[in-house]
Every structure is written in C-alpha cells, then in structure tokens.
Image (tube, rainbow, N blue to C red):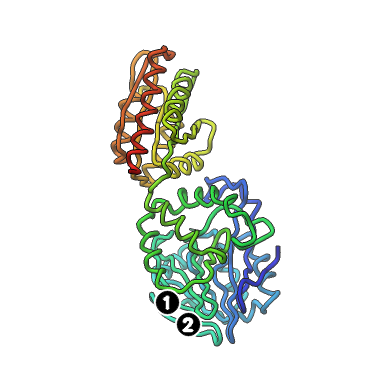
C-alpha cells in the first residue's frame, strides 16, 4: 500500500509480506505478516526498525517518498531478529552518515548476525534523543523477544514504537490502523503470534507492560500487524491477559487417533464438557499445525489431552504439541487425560506425567483398551464434565 502518515512527521514505511510461507522457518503465515518500519522526521530523520532482507528495496522506496535514504541521520534497531533487521546492513550502507542505535546487549548481535560494527551507538534505558521537533526516548524491554529488545517513544505525537511487543501475524489488508479494520478478525492471528513467538517470555512481557505504562501513549506502533491508535489499551489488555495465562472459561480438547477409538471417546468427552454449559473446541493434532494447537490451548483454561498408545508412549503428534507447550511454559491450566491402547497402556501414564510436569491441575484420567465400550464412552463423558466443572470452579 506504499507508505502512510500515521502522525505529523511520522510515517509507516514498512512492507507487507504475503510471500514468506514460514515465519522463523516453522510458523505458517496464511495471512502474511507485516514488517513495520517507521520514519520519524524532525530537523533530523530517524528510521525505526527495518524489514526482512528480500524486501529492503521496497523499504528504501517507501523511505524515498519522504526523505533521501542516503541522508538518514539515525537507524534505530528496537530488535535484531532478522525478520526486522535482515535489511539493516543494506540500509546502513545506503545511509553513510547514519548512526545505528541499539540497546547495549545488541552490539554483539549486530556484529555476529548482521556484520555491522561501525557507526553503532548503545543507548541506555531512558536515554533521550532530540531530532529537532521530534523527541525520542529509549526503553529497554529485554526478552520481548530477545535480550536486546527495546521500545522507542516519540513524545510530541505520543507514539510508542514497541518492536515485537503488541505485534501480531496477519497483514492489515488495505489498512494499517485498528480504527480501519474489524479487530476481531485479527485477534486469532495476534494470539497465534503471541503464543508461539513471545509467549515463553510472559514475565518479561508483563514487566514491559509495567515499565511502559509510565508513558503517555496515543498510538502503539509495533513491528508487526496493526497500529493501535483507536484503542492502544485493547492490545495492552490482550497481551496482559495472555501473559498472565488466564484462559477463557472453556475447554480445548487436543487429540490424536489412529483407527477411531480415541476419536470416538473424544466425541463423548466433548459432549460431556458441552453438557456442563462450557464452550469446547476439539483440535486434531495430526491434522492441525502445532502453532494452532498452541494457540487454542493458550486461549482456554481447560485442556483435555487424548491419544492412543504408540511405541509404548504418547502418540507422536500429541507428543510434539506437548513438547512445545512445555517449551512455551504455559501454566495455569486444568487438565484431563484420556487414552486408548491395544495390548498394554502407556499413553495415559506418560500423558499424566507430562501434565504434572507442566504444573497443570490434573482433574482426572481414563484409559481403555481397543474400541470404546458404552461404559468407556460414559467415562469419557464424565471426564469431560469434570474438566468443565473445574474450569467453572476456577472462575468463582
Ligand atoms: Fe519480529 Fe523477534 O522478531
């Protein structure tokens, strides 16, 4: 959509990427991702963040609509992951007098990952930079998403350039602001970004929200996705809720099934949840990319994990989903475990250990051999109802 003015003297000059299939080489991007870069123009001009390497020419063409890229005074790198910073070295070469500003922990990453050593200056937490008519300050928010991450605040227009914080997957179609779109249509992709990319850094996210709350903000301009100018508080509240891992009063059933036994029991368990008046979502881990499984479990407080025994253990697609949930350190869930087996069990006891390892509250377990009998179906339904009641009890 070319570049766009978001406030007096502040322009979005980023790129909408609808071509990359996998973010970080593993997370699907069915609705794309934007790399938001911003030009801040006082007497001096600063470029805040950049774009992924293949899109650097497009970034420079957007900059050129407002300023000669060769005359940029400052490059500000809030974060050095190559999705933003891949194009930084090229911009640094194009702008021979520009000084590149990073948090102190960014210096070695700049050198090792981007080969940049010259014209680099470390900025301290709270340090100010007067561009003449535009005033910037720098706020370290480590581990949202890497150790060097910071946010940059422009005080005359009260715009917070927040880096990965408050970002999301999904290109804002034909728009850039939350005032121009139906935000609800973007929330699932924002949560998938949060839960998969920054979710394991939930504590740093809460610390960052606390630290940045001192600033008087009219617009939150993150590195990905919508710019929040109608309601910056909306994305702050969403991030805070997800980082606290509260979960909606509902249940996610994550299952795998080889020949239908577990699937049949899952249907009974889901019905048991629904009969308690609690919303339920069933996710087939074999047919759903794990990034969506993580998102769905992050969304709801109740979890029911179900699978057959495979190689004496947990069915691999469910095993993989649990491994990533462990890595993301999702807490504060109430869970049930359901499993089937052929000649000997294994999945239920191992799933139980995994749930305990996650520090989730284990409500109950049930395992059965072969195809489920009528009694097995009743037990699965009872287990679903127990998880549902525990979810509701947790809200009281
Ligand atoms: Fe958008 Fe952690 O990079």
On residue 129, the disc is 2
- Quickly name the residue at label 1: 123
| Above or below: residue 289 compared with residue 148 | above
Residue 178 x, y percent position in the rendering? 59, 60
Q: Nearer the viewer, residue 345 or 88?
A: 345
Q: Earlier in the sequence, mark 2 or mark 1?
A: 1
Q: Nearer the viewer, residue 70 or 218?
A: 218
At 48% from the left and 24% from the top, the residue drawn is 267
| Above or below: residue 217 compared with residue 27 | below
At 39% from the left and 37% from the top, the residue drawn is 302
Residue 363 x, y percent position in the rendering? 31, 32
At 36% from the left and 13% from the top, the residue drawn is 343
Q: In the rendered image, which quarter is residue 54 located in?
A: bottom right
Q: Mark 1 packing: few (<14 Cα in 10 Å), some, or many (20+)?
A: many
Q: Nearer the viewer, residue 294 or 110?
A: 294
Which quadrant: the N terminus? bottom right
At 58% from the left and 54% from the top, the residue drawn is 183
Residue 27 x, y percent position in the rendering? 53, 46
| Above or below: residue 250 compared with residue 246 | above
Q: Nearer the viewer, residue 74 or 34?
A: 34
Q: Is residue 61 left or right of residue 216?
A: right
Q: Is residue 354 left or right of residue 189?
A: left
Q: Is residue 273 left or right of residue 289?
A: left
For the residues labelled 2 and 1, the Cα–Cα distance comes to 9 Å
Nearer the observer, disc 2 or disc 1?
A: 2
Which quadrant: the C terminus? top left
Residue 190 x, y percent position in the rendering? 53, 52
| Cβ atoms at labels 2 and 1 below 8 Å apart | yes
What element does badge 1 sit on? loop
| Above or below: residue 185 compared with residue 83 | above
What element does badge 2 sit on? strand
């Amino acid at each position: 959509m070319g570049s766009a003015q978001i406030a007096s003297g502040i322009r979005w000059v980023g790129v909408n990427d609808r071509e990359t299939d996998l973010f970080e080489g593993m997370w699907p991007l069915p609705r794309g991702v934007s790399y938001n870069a911003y030009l801040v123009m006082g007497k001096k001009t600063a470029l805040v963040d950049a774009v992924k390497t293949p899109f650097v020419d497009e970034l420079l063409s957007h900059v050129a609509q407002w300023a000669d890229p060769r005359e940029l005074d400052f490059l500000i790198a809030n974060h050095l992951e190559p999705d933003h910073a891949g194009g930084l070295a090229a911009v640094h070469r194009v702008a021979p007098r520009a000084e590149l500003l990073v948090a102190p922990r960014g210096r070695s990453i700049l050198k090792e990952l981007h080969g940049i050593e010259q014209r680099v200056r470390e900025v301290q937490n709270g340090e100010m930079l007067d561009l003449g008519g535009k005033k910037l300050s720098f706020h370290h928010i480590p581990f949202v998403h890497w150790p060097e991450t910071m946010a940059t605040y422009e005080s005359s227009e009260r715009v917070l350039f927040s880096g990965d914080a408050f970002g999301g997957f999904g290109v804002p179609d034909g728009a850039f602001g939350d005032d121009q779109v139906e935000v609800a249509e973007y929330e699932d992709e924002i949560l998938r970004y949060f839960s998969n990319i920054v979710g394991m850094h939930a504590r740093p996210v809460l610390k960052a929200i606390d630290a940045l709350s001192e600033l008087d903000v009219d617009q939150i301009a993150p590195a990905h996705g919508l710019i929040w100018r109608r309601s910056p508080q909306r994305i702050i509240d969403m991030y805070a809720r997800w980082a606290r891992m509260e979960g909606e009063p509902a249940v996610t059933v994550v299952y795998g099934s080889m020949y239908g036994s577990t699937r049949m029991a899952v249907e009974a368990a889901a019905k048991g949840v629904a009969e308690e008046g609690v919303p339920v979502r069933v996710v087939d881990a074999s047919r759903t990319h794990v990034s969506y499984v993580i998102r769905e479990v992050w969304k709801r407080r109740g979890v029911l994990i179900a699978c057959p025994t495979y190689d004496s253990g947990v069915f691999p697609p469910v095993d993989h989903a649990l491994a990533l949930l462990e890595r993301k350190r999702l807490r504060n869930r109430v869970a049930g475990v359901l499993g089937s087996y052929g000649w000997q069990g294994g999945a239920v006891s191992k799933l139980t250990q995994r749930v305990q390892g996650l520090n989730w509250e284990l409500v109950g377990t049930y395992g059965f051999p072969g195809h489920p009998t009528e009694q097995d179906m009743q037990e699965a339904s009872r287990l679903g109802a127990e998880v549902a009641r525990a979810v509701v009890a947790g809200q009281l």
